[in-house]
Image (tube, helix red, strand yellow):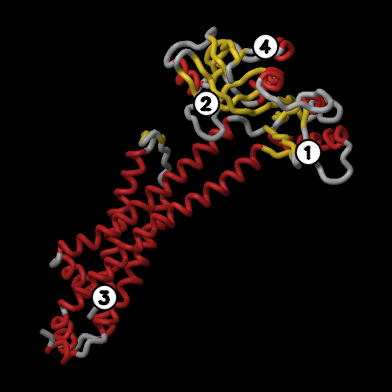
């Protein structure tokens, strides 16, 4: 019996039991759809976060204290903008981070408060939607002024312009002087859910930490280098300046990382998440494979006399086995193709939609489709072998006597 005839026979057999074949297909369809949809959500989230970080500038360096007693100060930040010792560094923008409750009239919210300097606007590529950014007089006078992210502004003032209004930050009265341009999301790296105040105000009005020298301690120093190609040079120069200031002879009490380091670390983490989501969804694909094996075992039992007749007419064991394996693979590939189509539709249907308060960003990839098809075909082959072998081992006389 030729392979083409065997394939035709297998398809005809499946067509004669449409309901049973359809139920077997359904398990594979659901599994493939789940794999493609979840992995597309994971990939889309990764791309969204990466784009957000890259939008903040790829020529950024981040200096952070390392160690229990390590500290960075406002003086360290000023020293890093030195044309002699750090010519590659064009700007330094220190920041202090804290959490606070914001209240405006009857509305309130909880947000991250960043204490910053005027250089922060350019260093982080931020734009103002209205009002003004924090200026040097605000820092010098420790003024209680604040710049809002778009999401925070919407939560507190709805559609009204917040500039000129007053809010309370941990019971202190602040005047809103500016509103940041929306970055299009409230996720990782977005300033939409943050507020900014002068760094000295954050330190002396909102923080209880003090240094023995009286200098302002900072959580992070953002450095902007002249060009992306100068990132490595900027890291070396910044490290050299801080080693001299901190009189370090052995291990550094600080770390200097680049935006690219952050992106690479994030991609490693999110890629692991994508694989994990794929494995979770793959469980449903495995269940679909078990359903195929169950259907094929039932089919072998029902067609025992047919197998006996075919063997009596000269069909070989490999012909019988090939037919049942072909049926199983046809079911899995058919379900895989339908699942890819449904998964493609699902990823586009939920892209940009908000479900249960969560906005989804998806990114369909042909790699996911090919992976799902290969896995579904492999599952059909794996779970179809046992029923096929069982059918091929039936003795012709016993099969003909089967009732």
Query: As drawn, is 390 to the left or to the right of 237?
Result: left
Real-space Cα separation, disc 4 to disc 2, in angstroms = 21 Å
Comparing 130 with 313, the one in front is 130
Is any atom of residue 118 visible in this view? no
Label 4 secondary element: loop
Q: Which residue is mark 3?
A: 3
Real-space Cα separation, disc 1 to disc 4, in angstroms = 30 Å
Real-space Cα separation, disc 3 to disc 2, in angstroms = 68 Å
Q: Against 145, is 354 above or below? A: below
Comparing 5 with 254, the one in front is 254
Q: Are marks 3 and 4 in contact (CB under 8 Å)?
A: no
Q: Which mark's residue is nearer the viewer, 3 or 1? A: 1
For marks 1 and 4, the one nearer the N-term is 1
Q: Write the residue at 76% across / 35% down.
A: 234
For marks 2 and 1, the one nearer the N-term is 1
Where is residue 231? Give x, y as percent: 72, 36
Residue 110, which numbered label? Answer: 2
Q: Quadrant of the C terminus?
A: bottom left
């Amino acid at each position: 019996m030729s392979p083409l005839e065997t394939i035709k026979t297998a398809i005809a057999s499946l067509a004669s039991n449409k309901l049973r074949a359809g139920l077997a297909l359904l398990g594979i369809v659901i599994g493939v759809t789940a794999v493609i949809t979840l992995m597309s959500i994971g990939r889309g989230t990764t791309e969204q976060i990466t784009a957000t970080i890259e939008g903040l500038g790829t020529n950024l360096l981040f200096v952070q204290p390392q160690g229990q007693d390590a500290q960075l100060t406002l003086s360290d930040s000023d020293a890093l903008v030195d044309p002699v010792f750090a010519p590659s560094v064009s700007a330094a923008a220190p920041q202090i981070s804290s959490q606070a409750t914001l209240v405006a009239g009857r509305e309130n919210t909880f947000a991250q408060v960043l204490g910053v300097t005027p250089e922060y606007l350019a260093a982080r590529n931020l734009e103002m939607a209205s009002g003004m950014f924090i200026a040097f007089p605000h820092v010098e006078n420790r003024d209680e002024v604040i710049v809002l992210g778009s999401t925070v502004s919407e939560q507190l003032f709805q559609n009204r312009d917040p500039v000129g209004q007053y809010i309370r930050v941990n019971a202190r009265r602040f005047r809103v002087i500016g509103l940041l341009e929306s970055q299009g999301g409230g996720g990782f790296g977005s300033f939409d859910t943050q507020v900014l105040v002068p760094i000295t105000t954050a330190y002396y009005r909102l923080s209880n930490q003090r240094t023995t020298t009286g200098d302002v301690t900072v959580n992070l120093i953002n450095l902007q280098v002249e060009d992306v190609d100068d990132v490595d040079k900027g890291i070396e120069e910044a490290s050299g300046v801080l080693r001299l200031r901190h009189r370090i002879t052995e291990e550094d009490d600080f770390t200097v990382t680049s935006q690219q380091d952050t992106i690479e670390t994030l991609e490693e983490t999110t890629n692991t998440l994508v694989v994990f989501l794929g494995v979770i969804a793959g469980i449903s694909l495995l269940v679909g494979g078990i359903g195929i094996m169950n259907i094929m075992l039932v089919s072998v039992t029902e067609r025992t006399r047919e197998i006996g007749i075919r063997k009596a007419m000269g069909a070989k064991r490999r012909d019988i086995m090939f037919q049942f394996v072909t049926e199983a693979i046809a079911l899995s590939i058919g379900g895989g193709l339908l699942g890819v189509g449904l998964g493609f539709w699902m990823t586009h249907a939920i892209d940009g939609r908000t479900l249960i308060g969560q906005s989804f960003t998806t990114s369909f990839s042909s790699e996911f489709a090919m992976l799902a098809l290969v896995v579904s075909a492999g599952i059909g082959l794996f779970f179809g072998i046992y029923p096929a072998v069982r059918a091929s081992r039936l003795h012709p006389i016993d099969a003909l006597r089967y009732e």
